[in-house]
Image (spheres, helix red, strand yellow):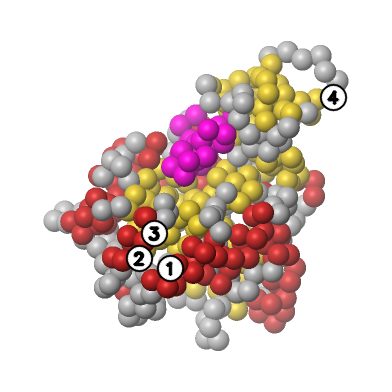
């Protein structure tokens, strides 16, 4: 297969030419080709495939509950429709085994490179009373998660201040699992101590953590000032303001940021009101696609990483050459996949996405195989609307 574009963002710069793909790899880059079997994308941008390491669901497909293989298949197709070639499904404990099984049979869109567990050991006191009290700390539960993951559990997010959590921290580190600080009320010194003792990722940096203050720069300051910490960041412009993102990128090298979506199954849902996660809750999907509770609180993200890419390039005027490593190469490097993935370079896997000037997915290729084509139309789960839509559908 040969793919042509006037704008291909390769590891060594922006190029006009042809990608020659064989056996799932980029075999050559050519400036000229007389081959008649060329897929010509004209002036559309070809960028490295998005690696989303924090994604709870999308397009009406969930990573909670029992987790049928059909649900996971739809989820991976939904990911591909948003330009994701590689993903860490952020699954509930009950889903870890099912996701691990799907990873072995994965030929459905985005590729599962690992599993992310956000919790259950989180400190929710900073979230207006949601899930008050300390979660039960169980080493047996941690061991079961690792067993269910079958070697694919790569990232676990924990609040380090939870009483009795240290044995779990040491266990996960011994198993080679990356630890992220998440949903935590630690101050600067406490957070820095955790980063000095094994934590190396900041979960959705700036959200559900202590913020910057002139007397204590908090968990956010610790994430930004500790050079060895890699920071997840949601760039939808709502979770973190664009002005705060400017501060982030002035304080810390962009090489230490990993763009994430933190998407939920509501990502891609039509505007309207939906049933919430309890009988007295209503979820609102705004005209702009943001997911809010009936009190106006953000309920996870709804915008894909591609939306955030558009924000950084168009609104913050950051060069695409600076932005693309944050959604591809940086996470691949952090989790040990950069030898074969993370950039468009001869010899690496042919993971790439073709995007429009409006930052919409035209086509997604994973390992050289097309996982999504915009001509397919919507891949949103119709059963989701029946289950969660008010009165059987969104209003």
The residue at which mark 3 appears reads as 172
Q: Are marks 2 and 1 in contact (CB under 8 Å)?
A: yes
Residue at the bottom extreme of this rendering: 279
Q: CA distance from mark 4 to mark 3?
A: 49 Å
| Above-or-below relation of 217 to 61 | above
Corner quadrant of residue 152: bottom right
Give the mark nearer the N terminus: 2 vs 1: 1
Callout 3 secondary element: helix
The residue positioned farthest toward the left in the image shown:
215
Front: mark 4 or 3: 3
Q: Is residue 16 above or below residue 57?
A: above
Residue that numbered label 4 is attached to: 37
Give the image location of residue 373, x and y in percent.
Answer: 76, 44
Name the image quarter holding the C terminus.
Answer: bottom right
Q: Is residue 278 left or right of residue 79?
A: left
Q: Earlier in the sequence, mark 4 or mark 1?
A: 4
First-in-chain label (4 vs 3)? 4
Q: Are marks 3 and 1 in contact (CB under 8 Å)?
A: yes
For residue 168, which numbered disc appears in the image? 2
Measured in 3D between alpha carbons, the distance from the residue under mark 4 to the one under mark 2, in whole angstroms, is 55 Å
Q: Position of residue 376 (x, y in %)?
A: 80, 50
Q: For mark 1, does the 10 Å Cα neighbourhood hold few (<14), some (14 to 19), or many (20 or more) residues?
A: some
The residue drawn where x is 41% and y is 52% is: 176
Q: Are marks 4 and 3 in contact (CB under 8 Å)?
A: no
Residue in the foreground of this view, choosing between 132 and 377: 132
- The dot on residue 142 is 1
Mark 2: which secondary structure?
A: helix
How far apart are the alpha carbons under marks 3 and 2?
A: 6 Å
Region rendered in magenta:
321-344
User: Marks 2 and 1, Cα distance to the nearest angstrom?
Assistant: 7 Å
Marks 2 and 3: in contact by CB < 8 Å? yes
């Amino acid at each position: 297969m040969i793919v042509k574009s006037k704008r291909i963002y390769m590891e060594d710069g922006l190029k006009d030419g042809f990608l020659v793909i064989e056996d799932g790899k980029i075999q050559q880059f050519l400036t000229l080709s007389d081959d008649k079997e060329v897929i010509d994308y004209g002036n559309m941008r070809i960028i490295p495939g998005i690696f989303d390491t924090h994604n709870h669901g999308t397009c009406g497909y969930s990573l909670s509950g029992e987790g049928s293989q059909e649900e996971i298949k739809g989820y991976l197709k939904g990911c591909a429709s948003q330009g994701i070639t590689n993903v860490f499904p952020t699954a509930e404990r009950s889903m870890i085994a099912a996701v691990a099984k799907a990873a072995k049979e994965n030929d459905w869109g985005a590729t599962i490179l690992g599993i992310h567990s956000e919790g259950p050991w989180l400190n929710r006191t900073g979230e207006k009373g949601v899930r008050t009290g300390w979660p039960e700390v169980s080493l047996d539960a941690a061991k079961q998660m690792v067993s269910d993951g079958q070697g694919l559990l790569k990232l676990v997010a924990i609040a380090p201040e939870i009483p009795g959590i240290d044995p779990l921290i040491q266990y996960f580190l011994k198993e080679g699992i990356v630890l992220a600080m998440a949903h935590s009320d630690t101050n600067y010194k406490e957070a820095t101590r955790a980063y000095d003792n094994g934590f190396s990722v900041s979960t959705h940096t700036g959200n559900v953590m202590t913020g910057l203050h002139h007397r204590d720069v908090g968990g956010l300051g610790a994430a930004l000032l500790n050079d060895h910490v890699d920071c997840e960041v949601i760039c939808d412009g709502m979770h973190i303001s664009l002005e705060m993102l400017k501060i982030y990128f002035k304080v810390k090298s962009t090489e230490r940021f990993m763009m994430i979506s933190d998407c939920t199954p509501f990502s891609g849902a039509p505007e309207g009101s939906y049933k919430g996660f309890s009988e007295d809750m209503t979820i609102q999907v705004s005209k702009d696609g943001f997911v809010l509770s009936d009190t106006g609180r953000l309920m996870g993200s709804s915008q894909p990483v591609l939306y955030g890419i558009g924000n950084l390039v168009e609104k913050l005027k950051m060069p695409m050459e600076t932005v693309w490593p944050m959604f591809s190469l940086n996470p691949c490097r952090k989790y040990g996949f950069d030898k074969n993935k993370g950039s468009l370079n001869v010899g690496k896997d042919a993971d790439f996405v073709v995007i429009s000037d409006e930052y919409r997915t035209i086509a997604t290729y994973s390992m050289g195989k097309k996982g999504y084509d915009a001509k397919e139309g919507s891949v949103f789960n119709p059963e989701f609307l029946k289950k969660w839509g008010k009165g059987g559908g969104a209003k």
